[in-house]
Amino acid sequence: MSIPRVNLPPDARQDTLAVREGLPPSPWGENSEALYLTSSFVHPDAATAARRFANEEEAFVYSRFSNPTVTMMERRLAAMEGTTGCIGTASGMAGITLLIMGLLKAGDHVVCSQSVFGSTIKLFQDFAKFGIETSFVSQTEPAQWREAMRPNTKLLFAETPSNPLTEVCDIRALADIAHAGGALLAVDNCFCSPALQQPVQLGADLVTHSGTKYLDGQGRVIAGAVCGPEELINARFVPVMRSAGLSLSPFNAWVVLKGLETLSIRMKAQSERALQLAQWLEAQPAVERVYYPGLPSHPQHALAMAQQNGSGGAVVSFVVKGGREGAFATIDATRICSITANLGDTKTTITHPSSTSHGRLSEPQRQAAGIVQGMVRVAVGLDDVEDLKADLSAGLSRL
């Protein structure tokens, strides 16, 4: 027995894969993918059960590590990322935890961007107590990544664009550095999603996702994933999942699965609005600096356009006059933007990174990453951009 696949043309394009890849319909012939809310699966006899638990026969066994709905989401996301394998996880951070646990051991070394999400920095730091050391380097300087390499370096980890500065790293350059040193490159593709960027096409080995963000797209569930070669997924990550239970629930997988169907059109529309808002923010007297890869003023603008399918994405960060007080005044004056640290929603969200998403870091760590107290991050949704401008004007006009 083997788990069947959808009969799609081998050259089916991404938008088709986004609505078709997964599993074939059940005998009932449903057109919308089924939701399998079951913890376990029944076997015809004890011998078959034994073979399946021993991985001698492919089948669904127990939803901690195998479930049809989760498999549908995994196959669809893998197809969109251009990888042969994917494993769903309970959250984006669970995906990075699975990455570390599956690939690394005591004595190994990691090189990581100092500009990644605050919780990611804390997670790598926490694994130091298990003997895994991490060196943090500049997101945008490949020379620093190369200099940080050691004989025991096993993993390079980057997030591009970064949260919240939208710094863009050269994926191909980092892949070359990793592979020259016998290491793997993992890229967090949360901000762009496969609709805008496919890191494996640029040399990355693995891709991590917080499905909570753009993959779901409406702020409904917590989910994560790791995409990569099927052989590596099965050999290194599935065994950890079976033991540690960082599992994605079938319901959350189903929500993300349906979110993937509209990912491309959402990312296009939200990115277009983000560019308009970023251009407007650059002209505001109370704004000291705007961080958005779609702007020519962005230091990595050309690289971003090459890597991100000509799009800057949907996240805009900017620094206002007046430091923390000015940032809080700008945020508190909004009436449309949702004040929350989540992003990727169809509703525009606004937050103060220094006290929310990166609040657990020390001030020196934040300063090293360029996250100042006057910074505000806006994740642009599908609100009318003129309404967003008016919403932000209310606070900016008082600074």
Image (cartoon, rainbow, N blue to C red):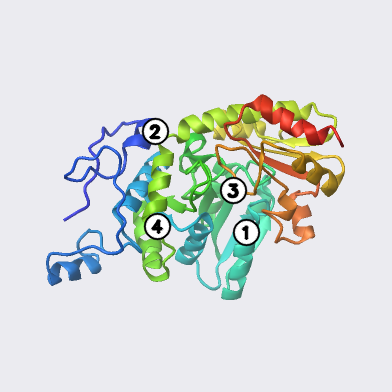
Q: Secondary structure at mark 4?
A: loop
Q: Check disc 4: other Cα within 10 Å, few if <14, some if 14-19, many if 20+.
A: many
Q: Position of residue 374 (x, y in %)?
A: 81, 45
Residue at the disc numbered 2: 14
Instruction: Say what amino acid the circle numbered 4 marks.
Output: Ser
Q: Are marks 4 and 3 in contact (CB under 8 Å)?
A: no
Q: Position of residue 153 (x, y in %)?
A: 56, 62
Asked if residue 18 lies left or right of residue 347, the reply is left
Q: Secondary structure at mark 1?
A: helix
Residue at the disc numbered 3: 159
Residue at the disc numbered 4: 249
Instruction: Say what amino acid the circle numbered 1 marks.
Output: Ser
Q: Which mark is residue 398?
A: none
Q: Which mark is residue 119?
A: 1
The picture quadrant where one finds residue 319 is top right
Disc 3 or 2, which lies upstream in sequence? Answer: 2
For discs 1 and 3, the disc positioned in front in the rendered view: 1
